[in-house]
Image (cartoon, grey):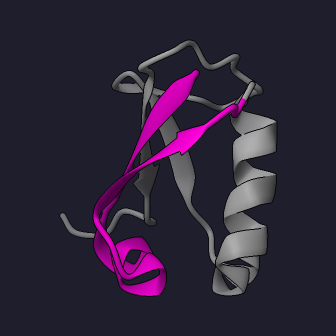
Amino acid sequence: MEVKILAFGKIADVTGQKEWKWQDIADTTALRKKLEQEFPALQTMKYQLAVNKKLANAEVGLENDAEVALLPPYSGG
């Protein structure tokens, strides 16, 4: 199973990339854990996940070819 990760704003700066793929990630909880292991700076950042263009406020299972966006805090008016 492969998941496409998209990073925006400050998160892309932390990860050093805007897009990549990871294998064998079952759900958003496992994804957050892996992200924060790979990129320790994310442990102290607030960010949201969107799975297939829908905000994931709870744990969401990830299917093959799911697209997960890492969204930094919003600002503006």
- Residue 70 percent location from the top left of the image: 45, 53
Q: Answer with left or right where residue 24 lies relative to residue 55.
A: right
- Residue 52 percent location from the top left of the image: 38, 21
Residue 54, placed above or below residue 4:
above
At 51% across and 28% down in the image, what residue appears? 2
Q: Answer with left or right where residue 4 lies relative to residue 29.
A: left
Residue 37, placed above or below residue 40:
above
At 59% across and 29% down in the image, what residue appears? 56
- Comparing 55 with 62, the one in front is 62
- Magenta-colored stretch includes residue 66: no
Give the magenta range: 1-25
- Comparing 13 with 22, the one in front is 22
Q: Quadrant of the N terminus?
A: top right
- Residue 61 percent location from the top left of the image: 70, 16
- Comparing 9 with 20, the one in front is 20
Please tell me in which quadrant of the rendered image residue 17 appears.
Answer: bottom left
- Residue 42 percent location from the top left of the image: 65, 76
At 75% across and 57% down in the image, what residue appears? 34
